[in-house]
Image (cartoon, rainbow, N blue to C red):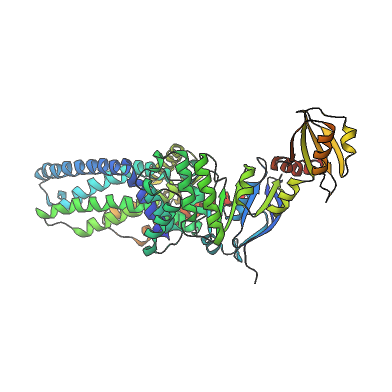
Amino acid sequence: MNNFTVEAIELTRLYGGREAVSNVNFTLSKGEVLGFLGPNGAGKSTTMKMLTGNLAPSHGSVKICGIDMIENPKEAKALIGYLPEMRPLYKELTVDEYLTMAARLHRVSAKHIKKAVENAKERCGLTHMSKRLIENLSNGYQQRVGIAQAIIHSPMVVILDEPTVGLDPIQIRDIRTLIREVGTDHSVIISTHILPEVEMVCDQVQIIDKGKLVFNGSIDVLKRQRVGNKLLIGLRNPPAIEEILRISGVSEAESLANGLIRVRYAENAEPAEAIVQVAVQQGWGLHQIAPDQTSLEDVFMQLTYQEQIAA
Amino acid sequence: MIINVARKELKSVFASPMGWVILSLLMFAFGTQYLNAVNDYFAVMSGAMRPAERTGVTQFVGQSVYGLASFIMLFAVPLLSMRLISEERRSQTLPFLFSAPISLTEIVVGKFLGLVAFLSILVLFIGAMLSTLNIWADIDFGFLLTNSLGLLLMVAGFSALGIYFSSLTQQPVIAAILTFIALFALMMLDRFFGDDPTNILGGLSLTRHFQSFASGLIDSADIVYFILFAVTFLTLTVRRLDADRLRG
């Protein structure tokens, strides 16, 4: 008996012959936060709909804590909390009414409903909004109600489709803390466009492009790919590139448009000190030296772009 | 679980003034009809000399009020049923129900029962209103009971049809118009094929099956007809929603 909370096995979804999602496999264990990345129309939302039983997969299957979504949809759905991209809010109800209804529909027993509602409101910072009509809440607060409804029955798996859209920076920070918090004892799947967010909250990352998984692994792998063996140096009197190449350990150098020079070095070599020394001796006017990090955007671009070439 | 869905529906009807306004307007119409019928009864009966021309007050007033009720429901039910699914489709709230641990059948039946519960408030009120005749006369409660049962079964049938049309579209107004046309056609069948009792099309008419209830007769064939009618359209609705899940 493995303790995967979510298993997606060869998930495929066809829309009139076109594969919106093809052959997606992954597993998620308890206490992990999975980030789902991908450009628009890559199939993120479609995958999430299939995971939550809102859409039937054309092939493949989904298992939540070992329960098959197609064979036992009710039992499997009871373990999931889902916030779709479009918030499913009944705007004519108050926050309390809506959350009570959500708790009831998710089989929270009658005597625990009140507690569950209070708890969810507190976690999402909605306590002072209890009696307000959802219609009159701001966009950000509506989003919080959406998240509250997804965690109200403390499900094993929480699936949030772009949870931080439309929130202000403080709210985003709160929601990230909340996701981390929920992620410690449950599993969380979030999809997002905001790459730094993934780095902050996720343990695992999946990048999906044109319905295919192009990257699936822990966040550390992605981070390592990011750092790379590169330095960025700024010189007031830059010498010819050849002179820099002569420094031991440096394997490549190129000057960039903004006046800086990017230096690549071999694995295990640490030419930083040598560069500083040479620069001082030769009077190059060194004013900046820093490790050059590829931004997550670049990694993302590389991964999705490679796929395009292959295809 | 079905109860929870039904409660949700009732809650959203009463969350806006809509539910209250419809209840009060309809009761106003029925109340006026009731008063007029009582007045008419005295006018008509004072002119009716022969015993054969005389009818009981329950039948006279009851037929008048229930006749109006069945006609008004033809307009009221489409207006109430139109939102049930199309509105959720439009504001994209269906995933909320679909991802909860309830089956499609439970969702549809829950919504249906929610609407029928709301309409049964009206049926109850009409019954209570007519029972007040008992203060001055000795009325036939059996007659009231069969009429109430008939009205309830008929609005249940209307509601099932309304839910089905509501599941077909995103626009509540289109759902209402389609429901109204379908109900009206089913009513009219009796006009065209009513003279021939063996005609199958005439047998489909909703009015004909309400007639026996209206005259105070409980015919199991009519009860079965209304139940089958409702079950058929609820099944079609479930299938329509399932197609959403399969086709996306």
Residue A255 location (% of width, % of height): 82, 31
Check the picture and name the quadrant holding the C terminus of chain A: top right
Q: Quadrant of residue A23?
A: bottom right
| Residue at (21% x, 50% y) in the render | B62
> In the visual, does A240 lie left or right of B189?
right
Residue A186 in view: no
> In the visual, does B207 lie left or right of B172?
left
Residue A40 location (% of width, % of height): 65, 40
Residue A72 in view: yes
Residue A6 location (% of width, % of height): 62, 60
Q: Which of A200 and A245 is in front in this view?
A: A245
Residue B84 location (% of width, % of height): 43, 46
| Residue at (39% x, 48% y) in the render | A95
In the image, residue A118 above or below residue A209? below
Q: Quadrant of residue B213?
A: bottom left
Q: Which of B27 and A232 is in front in this view?
A: A232
Q: Which of A270 and A221 is in front in this view?
A: A270
